[in-house]
Image: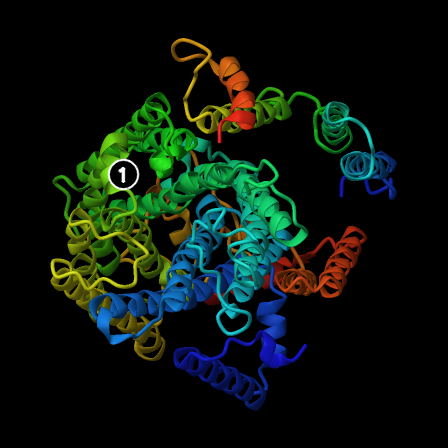
Amino acid sequence: MANSKKRVPMNHVIGFVLSLVMTLVAAWAAIGSDLPVTWIIIGIMILALLQAGVQLFMFMHVTEAESGNGHVPWNMMFHGFALAGIIVAGSLFTMSFGFDHDHGGGGGDHQQHEEQEQQDHSGH
Amino acid sequence: MHITDILVTGEPIIYGAMVSMALVGIALFFLLTYFKKWGWLWREWLTTVDHKKIGVMYILSALLMLFRGGVDAMMMRVQLAFPDLGFLNSQHYNEIFTTHGTIMIIFMAMPFLIGLMNIIVPLQIGARDFAFPYLNALSFWSFFFGMALFNISFVIGGSPDAGWTSYTPLSGAAMSPGPGQNFYLMGLQLSGIGTLATGINLMVTILKMRAPGMKLFHMPIFTWSTLVTCFIIVFAFPILTVALALLTIDRIFGSQFFTLTGEGLPMMWANLFWMWGHPEVYIVILPAFGIFSEVIATFAKKRLFGYNVMVWSMIVIALLSFLVWVHHFFTMGAGAFVNSVFSISTMLIAVPTGVKIFNWLATLYKSKIEFTVPMLWSLAFIPSFILGGVTGVMLGMAAADYQFHNSYFLIAHFHYVLIAGTVFACFAGLVFWYPKMFGHKMNERLGKWAFWLFFFGFHVCFFPQYFLGLDGMPRRLFITNVVEWLPLNVISTVGAFGMGLGFIVFVYNVYYSFRYSERETTGDSWNGNGRTLEWATTTPVPYYNFATVPYVDEIDPYVRMKEEGKTTFEESKVKPIHMPSYTGQPFIMMAFLGLASFGLVFEWMYVAVFGLLGGVVMMIRRSFDYDDGYYVPVEEIKRTEKKARGL
């Protein structure tokens, strides 16, 4: 191992505890709290972003220096974001069934997004 | 709870299966005890981290699953050819087509290819093992316990019966109560961990552990196909993991992700499933393309035509594979615009695939072809696969798909691509690299018998199914006594038994070759036609693979090495080799997680929690495991190499 001098990686321990705490808070918000739905969703989204931050900065290699092939973590994150984009935008596009009553003609992803929300409540 | 509550009762076929499983189990136990092989089994196999041995275990499991899935297939064919016989009832038929599909994709095709990758990829790039050998063992055991869990379903608790696609709401708790569907979810989830880990493991191995001088565009084409496949695995499998987890939570803990009650979206399952499912079919076909490329180049005795184009077309296929998933459910009822988008992206895939076909033909053009068994499989692949590909484009036309959807036309199409593509490749690859694994070749004459039986059986079985589909026969139907369908169904069943016969000859050939085949004396087994580094090692391959790793700065480096008389053993350059230690931890960890999955299947929470805790304890143990492996001394390397090379 490269840095076997440091037996207890404090960074990882703190990160692990933080991510567990945030998960529990999110679970409590969804199951145990009496907050209004909008606030639960906003709260969980914020926790998700913080969670991603903890993962990226305390466990992954975002802080790593640039190597011969550019900044590798950023390259990989680009692929990840591209895939997430395909999954989210693609699902919204598909599950909207392409029926857009409110906008004339084929819209972009943002329009599809709005349609999807309306579809969810009225479509089926 | 009494034992008879969870055993499946009342089916003579299943009683027969139980008895035969018990007999095989007792026989194995007796043989291992009688020959005192328990210690050998533990030391040499269950605790191994050697990529070659893990690969062999993958392939053995895959052959076993090919048998199981094949028996399922033949039972279905008997039912369809003689619908009035009452051979299977509808429930049993549903269970059989579900397990057939799931087993063939998840527990046969993938482990077969991953097994070949395990053995061959490190040898092709000049590596001594995987980047993470411990994780590799973990992957295998997670696959193995997932497979075991899925397979016991038909004697304990009842098999899943909602199709291999497991569409909601049918597969939800309301419409499929009981443990059957849970077996599907937990079996796939458990083995999925292994697949994802293997994807990462091989990706790191290929990116970081290549021989000195070997650039990405010097890599053998099979290694390239593996790398591209790994990217697809790493990006696609998390989608399946999430979808399975959501459905598990739906079924076991009563949430409503995929049910209309509670504002869930049943079609979201189909959407997520195929977002994984379409890349999945490329996970099983790209390595097959890699194998065919290697075999064709070797026995055409030429460099692969258009190497760079071959690589780029695989990369393009991989990208497109994430953009076509909706073509699996055009008939969901999405509007014309949605379906058109996916129709066009689907047809685009035919372009890079066509490029590959022409490159194989160009490699064969004006070459001196040697008709060995692996080459026969590869040559048979080209026209057979084209039949599957062309009908795929037909299915890709959204408007026409409303006619073809879920008919036997579709069944014929995907068996044409999956069998002529993946299964032919598995056989070709296994026969091709067999001498590297076991030190002797498979018998050519028996191999040709197996090939011709399987090849004709395959076409007789599936070609009529196109016409059954056009005659309107739907899939997953167990009563088919319609006059126009019967003759074609009977022909198809005859073909299925031909394939079964081919498989039996193949398995007999394994035994026959073990007994009678000549042992290999050189590493370059196919008349000195090897082109890539795996043929530069001795046979049997020493556990450290390469005594000295050659410098590589071209495609097909072994061709020049042979001209210049170089080997992978340059005595003056031998240094101690760092190797990983064997460990039983992966086996034990995954046994615990297998137990946890079994508990979840029956919703016995104490068992599940106990298994999960056991798994966590094993992970903590691993975190404090400072075993850095050992060094093979120079003396031992020299002794091994001199013996193997007859120096």
Left or right: B257 as drawn, with respect to B438: right
Q: Nearer the viewer, residue A47 or B118?
A: A47
Instruction: Give the x, y percent position of residue B348.
Output: 29, 27
Q: Image quadrant of residue B490?
A: bottom left
Classify B296 as above or below B148: above
- Asked which quadrant contains residue B104, the reply is bottom left
Q: Nearer the viewer, residue A49 or A7?
A: A49
Q: Residue at x 55, y 42 (%)?
A: B258
Q: Amino acid at mark 1?
A: Leu
Q: Position of residue B55 (x, y in %)?
A: 49, 59
Quarter of the image that includes the C terminus of chain B = bottom left
Nearest to the observer: residue B460 or residue B410: B410
Q: Choose between B168 and B463: the one closer to the eye.
A: B168
- Report the residue at 70% width, 56% height from top: B629
Locate residue B480, reporting x and y percent.
Answer: 22, 62
Determine the residue located farthest toward the top in the rendered image.
A104
Q: Which residue is mark 1?
A: B304
Q: Secondary structure at mark 1?
A: loop
- Drawn side of residue A68 relative to residue B163, left or right: right
Quadrant (top left/top right/bottom left/bottom right) for the N terminus of chain B? bottom right
Report in which chain the residue with disc 1 lies: B
* Above/below status of B145 relative to A19: below
Residue A61 point in image, percent of width and height: 70, 29
**Residue B552 visible somewhere in the drawing:** yes
